[in-house]
Amino acid sequence: MTTSRRSFLKRASFTTLGLWLPQTFAATKAGLPRSTPEAENVSTKAILDFLDAVDEAKFELHSLMMLRHGKVIAEGWWAPYGPEFVHTMYSMSKSFTSTAVGFAVAEGKMSLDDKVISFFPDDLPEKVSDNLAAMRVQDLLTMTPGNEKEPTGSVVKEENWVRTFLAQNITHKPGTQFMYNSVATYMCSAIVQKVTGQTVLDYLTPRLFAPLGITGMKWETCPRGINTGGWGLSIQTEGLAKFGLFLLQKGKWNDKQLLPAKWIEEATSFHIQQPGGDKPERPKTQNDWLQGYGYQFWRCQGTAFRGDGAFGQFTIVLPEQDAVIVMTSENKNMQGQLDLVWKHLLPAFDAKGSANADLGRLKTLRLTPPNGHKTSPAAVNRTFALEANELGLKTAEFAFEGGRCMFKADYHHITCSFDSWQRDEAAFPGTPPRLISGGKPEKPAAHKIAAHATWTDDNTLVMTWRYYETPHSDTVTCKFEDDRVTITFLNSITAMNPKAKDARAPLKGKIVA
C-alpha cells in the first residue's frame, strides 16, 4: 500500500469527507432496472451458448444474473430456487465482511495497521509471540496472518473463537505468506463488532444493505453472538448483483458515495500472490486462484475481480466491460464453471449476435428430479419402530395419497411429490448439509425444503430433499423388505466424493402398524 493510501485509510471518515451518513437514509426495496442484452450491446446467443455448455458439463446452477451499464440483461433461477429466496454464500460472505471493515476504517473507528491483539486484551495467550504481536488487521484481510496451519476446524469446536484463534501457532511473519484462512475473516468480524458495538450484519444494514434495497439477509453467529464473517451469510441473488454493481461503481449508489472509492480500489487490488505455479494441465495464467488476492477479494484472469464461495457462489466484476455476473450453484469444479464464463459470457460483451435470439429459456429453468416410478405395490401406509440411532428418532411413518408421499419421523414431517418439487419446511435432525458450522442453536431451526419422491424398483423409495436456501440436498433411500425398512442418507456434499460416506448411520425399523 502506498503511503498516501495508508494515510487516507487511517484518517478518512464520512464526516470529514462530507459523505452520506447512514442515520439519515430511508431504506428502499427498489429492484435494479431491466434491459435486454442487445440494447446493452451483448450477444443473446452467447448467453444461450453458456446455458448449453452448463448443461453439457452437468454443472448445477441455481441462479444466474448478468448486468451491463447498471441494468439487468439476463436472469434465471433453476426451480425450485427462485428470486425471492436467499441462498447460502459460504466464503462469498468474506467480501461483505471486508466491506464492513472498509466502512469502519472510513469512519475512523479503526485502521488497517492496528494490531489484532490490541482489540482483545482479555483473550490473549499467556505468552504473546513476536509474530502474534505484529499481526495487523491488514494481514487478516489478505489471508497472511502467519498461521502454521489453517485453524478454522480447531477454532469452531470451541466456545471462544477469538481466544482459540489467538492461541494458534503464528510461525510466519504476518503479511508474508498467503494461506486461505476463514477464521482470519471471522477475526475481522469480531474486530468490527468490538469497535462498533454491532454485528457485521447490523453494522452493514444502514450503510450498505438498506441503501441498496437489499432485505431478508441472514448471517450465522459464533457461540458468542459474533457473525461468522468468513461464511454464513445468506442473501438473494439480486442482492448479490447489487453488491457487485456497488463495487463496480466504486462505492457509489444513486449518486451517493457510500464508501470511499479508494477503499474499493485498494480492497480489490493485488496484495499477495497465492502459492502455486504452472501445472501441465493448466498454466498459472489460466488459474483463477493464482491471480493474486486483495482484501477478501480474488483477482481473475484479465482485469476482473470477484468474491466467491464454495460450490460456485460468484460475484464477478468486469470493469472493462462495465458488467457484473452473479451465479449461485452447487459445483465441485469451480474453475470449470469460471472457464465457461470466460469462454462464452466474456466474449458476449460488444459482440455481434442475433437480435432474434430468445431468452425465454431463462424463465423455464428447473432442476430435474430423479427418474423412477410414481407408484409401487409397496406404497402402503405403515409405521415402523426404529432401532436406537444417533438421530434420536423413535418412529418412521409413510403415507401415500394423491400423488404424494408423506414421511414422518417422530414430529418431523416432510411431504414429497411424485410429479415435481413439493415445498415444505422441516427441522429434520442433521439437516441441511453444510461444510462448516456456526454457533449451535438451542433448538433445530426449520429449513425450506423442496421434496420429491420416486420408486426406483418395487421395494425402493428414493426421496430427494432439496434445501433451496442452500446449495445442498439429501438423497434418502428407503428399502422395504417384508416387515422391515432401512433408511439411508447421502448428502450432496458427500456425494461429490465417491469414496466418502455420509456421517449419518442408516435408520432401521420394524413395522408396528
Image: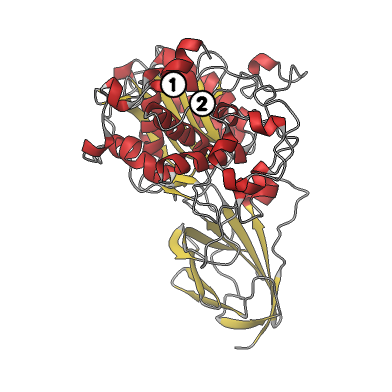
* Percent of width and height locating residue 68: 35, 21
Q: Which residue is mark 2?
A: 112
Report the side of 68 relative to 428 (left or right): left
Q: Which residue is mark 1?
A: 9
* Percent of width and height locating residue 480: 68, 74
> Where residue 362 is drawn, which disc sits there?
none
* Residue 388 location, quadrant: bottom right
Using the image, determine if residue 115 lies above or below residue 292: below
Q: Is the residue marked by circle 1 packed among few (<14), some (14-19), or many (20+) residues within 10 Å?
A: many
Residue type at numbered disc 1: Leu
Q: In the depicted view, which residue is nearer to us: 305 or 62?
A: 305
Instruction: Determine the residue positioned at 44% across, 25% down.
Output: 47
Q: Secondary structure at mark 1?
A: helix
The residues bearing labels 2 and 1 have C-alpha atoms spaced at a distance of: 8 Å
Q: Is the residue marked by circle 2 packed among few (<14), some (14-19), or many (20+) residues within 10 Å?
A: some
* Label 2 or label 1, whichever comes before in sequence order: 1
Report the side of 109 relative to 92 (left or right): left
